[in-house]
Amino acid sequence: MIDGSSIDRVTAVLRERAQALSAGARMPSTRELTAQLAVSPVTLSRALAALAGEGVLVTRPGSGTYVAERGPAADPLEDLSWQTLALGDRTVDASSVAFLLRGAEPGQLSLTGGYPNSSLLPGRALALAIARAARRPDAAERPPVAGIAPLREWFARQVAGTVSADDVLITAGGQSALSAAFRAIAPSGSSVLVESPTYIGAIAVARAARLNVIPVPTDEHGVRPDVLAETLALTGARLFYCQPTYQNPTGTILAPDRRQAVLEVARDAGAFVIEDDYARWLGHGATAPPPLISEDSDGRVIYIGSLTKVLSPNMRVGALIARGPVAERIRAHRVVDDFFVSRTLQEAALELLTAPAWRTHLTRLAAALSERRTALLRALATTAPDLHLGVAPSGGLHLWVRLPDGIDDVALAEHARAAGVLVSPGRPYHPAEPPAPHLRLSYAAAANTRELATAVQRLATAQRA
């Protein structure tokens, strides 16, 4: 595996060298640079490609690499203030989501992020699947707008119940599906109910669509149906977003006796339920319950699933399942937004999902996640015993830990970053004021269990500071 920090280091060095040369100057040869920088040809080629993409360097096959012509410097006095008036008062706050996508800097360890470490993902199997998909005779043809039929059939089989392939819409990952569903169902200015705490990305999407985000409290068994009923009646909302299985960030599973209760409450209120099943293939303990949509008899549940977390952040392939008029409206939004998902990505996903490597990968991933969860729990118990765990999850990627009263979780996250470890403060996961300080700690982002132990030590040091 290529060390991303090495590529960043080499890129920075080459950028500095290029800036010291005049435009058109020839850079040293690849052989000279690999020797001078003590890196592999692969690492060097990626750094050179990055700088070519930035417009710093120009590669001329058979000749070498040269410093690119420099464009005119930007006018520091250029006045762009007119845009403020033209844009109006609507804003899109992506800061919380951007935090989740931020990678660790050299020397930092990560207990945050929403994706497993690359060592846990099926890189070789995925590369082979992409290569096979690219060689298909129809690889360059436009796919059906709803997605290729075999992939839609595969998702329908995973959900079971009364769902058919005709109900499945292939999307560019779960976030794209969530955005389309929110905007299609809830008019601007209306309310959407969410579990509290809940997935940061759902809050960001709802607010970008100008929806009022209303929290519904949860406990160790998931959302409380009685409070959900009261909140629906009080707000008149017609949309409830939830994650019944391995909820993010708490890791809870909606209790069996609450599943039908949630559907009945939504039915009585005439409301839709968006089921975000992001962690369907991230189980590593007891068998996950079937999706909530499998118990839905009247098209009330809109289901969202994604392959991104279990395969690769770059495998932006997911599914949105809906039935009836709401399905037509969601499909219309999706078509207007981005037409369709790349056929190559869809075919590559199908290649892998129908190969023996898929089940092998799930087995290995479950074992690795279980080991890492145990390691993080052990490190917390030993090094940071005053952090209280709510639920020991049997799936997903995170632990949700309660901090002692009086600790500012956002400030602690900043102190932890300065101490060399990234953690997610709990406050952004609440659409309103949080009842207590928490942290969300990922056990999947680190390279190995040793890093998890060291990361917790750094977190404990930051807490004592």
Image: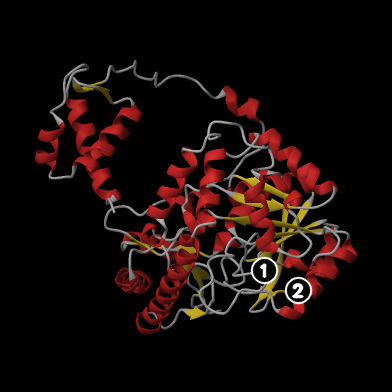
Pointer 1 and pointer 2: residues touching (CB < 8 Å)? Answer: yes
Residue 65 showing in the rendered view = yes
Q: What's the CA distance linking mark 1 and mark 2?
A: 8 Å
Say the numbered circle drawn on residue 244. 1
Q: Is residue 228 left or right of residue 362?
A: right
Q: How many marks?
A: 2
Q: Quadrant of residue 125?
A: bottom left
Give coordinates of residue 356: x percent, y percent. Answer: 48, 62
Q: Which residue is mark 2?
A: 259
Q: What residue is shown at x 38% (from left), y 77% (from top)? A: 375
Q: Amino acid at mark 1?
A: Pro
The foreground one among 48 and 239 is 48
Residue 228 against residue 40 in the figure, above or below: below
Residue 211 makes an appearance in the image: no
Marks 1 and 2, the one that precedes in the sequence: 1
Work out whether residue 416 or residue 351 is closer to the camera in this orientation and state it: 351
Q: Position of residue 332 (x, y in %)?
A: 75, 38
Which image quarter: residue 72? top left
Q: Residue at 64% across / 25% down in the picture?
A: 86
Q: As drawn, is 180 to the left or to the right of 313?
A: right
Q: Quadrant of residue 464?
A: bottom left
Q: What residue do we see at 66% from left, 50% from top?
A: 152
User: Callout 1 environment at 10 Å: few (<14), some (14 to 19), or many (20+)?
Assistant: many
In the picture shown, does residue 375 fall above or below 296? Answer: below
Amino acid tagged 2: Arg
Residue drawn at (50%, 57%) of the image: 355
Which SS class for mark 1? loop
User: Would residue 62 be found to the left or right of residue 397 on screen?
Assistant: left
Q: Where 454 falls versus 125 (above or below)?
A: below
Mark 2 lies on a secondary structure that is: helix
